[in-house]
Image (cartoon, helix red, strand yellow):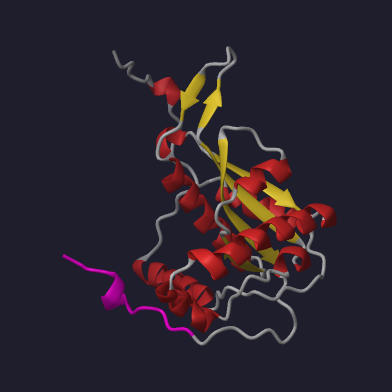
Amino acid sequence: MMMSKSRDDYLPLTGYEELPADAMLTRAQSFLELMKTRRSVRSFSRRPVDRKVIELCIQAAGRAPSGANQQPWKFVVVSDAELKRQIRQAAEVEERAFYEERASDQWLEVLRPLGTDAEKPFLEDAPYLIVVFCENYRLDENGKKIKHYYVRDSVGIAIGMLITALHNAGLACLTHTPSPMQFLREILGRPDNETALMILVAGYPKKGVMVPDLDKKTLDEIALFL
């Protein structure tokens, strides 16, 4: 039997501000212009970044909605040089296998405009690697497994918010997904209930960095209004 919540379990909605129509349009347009400047970069400066900036961006990501509010994410922030070296070495093993054995010719052709290969120096150059793990279940105080729902959906939303927060703070980032990623759990000593989903590389772009000349789909190509 499902228990209904009492009014004591709820709080008034605070912080929401309804804006005049013209202010809504202005703010939406301003945000779009900001996000138009977001680019993935693969060459990072070794310049240090204030850890507090990363902390605030992760806190923003932690405000993401999640299935049943289970918040099934864990952000492991790596700045230690030796750990970054180990991650790079293990990632490049998987990347070489991908480019030399696993990837089809069609897949490699799609990747060609990006200029990627098995070498991943950014994993050591960038000041921070934010390794995002999915928490598939948790253990209660009695050691019983509590299953989490909509895990990848929820973590994906949080990653999107983190990317946006980093860009808003003036940092560059790169989503990196070597496959398979079991080595991340081993190197970082994470428990069995966590699965690595992504490495988010964060820092300042290297001076003079070049990025591919890419187009984004138009509104008509990505949206349908009925």
At 71% from the left edge and 50% from the top edge, which residue is drawn?
A: 77
Q: How many marks?
A: 0
217 is within the stretch colored magenta? yes
Q: Nearer the viewer, residue 160 or 189?
A: 189
Whether residue 1 is situated above or below residue 178 in the rendered picture: above
At 43% from the left edge and 28% from the top edge, which residue is drawn?
A: 10
Q: Please state the extent of the stretch shown in magenta in the rendering.
A: 214-226
Q: Is residue 65 visible?
A: no
113 is within the stretch colored magenta? no
Whether residue 141 is situated above or below residue 22 in the rendered picture: above
In screen coordinates, is 136 left or right of 91? Answer: left
User: Which quadrant of the figure has residue 47?
Assistant: bottom right
At 61% from the left edge and 59% from the top edge, which residue is drawn?
A: 94
Task: Residue 129 in the image: state x and y as whole percent.
Answer: 70, 57
Task: Residue 100 in the image: state x and y as whole percent.
Answer: 56, 69
Task: Residue 33 in the image: state x and y as whole percent.
Answer: 49, 78
Residue furthest toward the left?
A: 226
Q: Is residue 71 visible?
A: yes
Task: Residue 225 in the image: state x and y as whole percent.
Answer: 20, 67
At 48% from the left edge and 67% from the top edge, which residue is drawn?
A: 103
Whether residue 10 is situated above or below residue 40 in the rendered picture: above
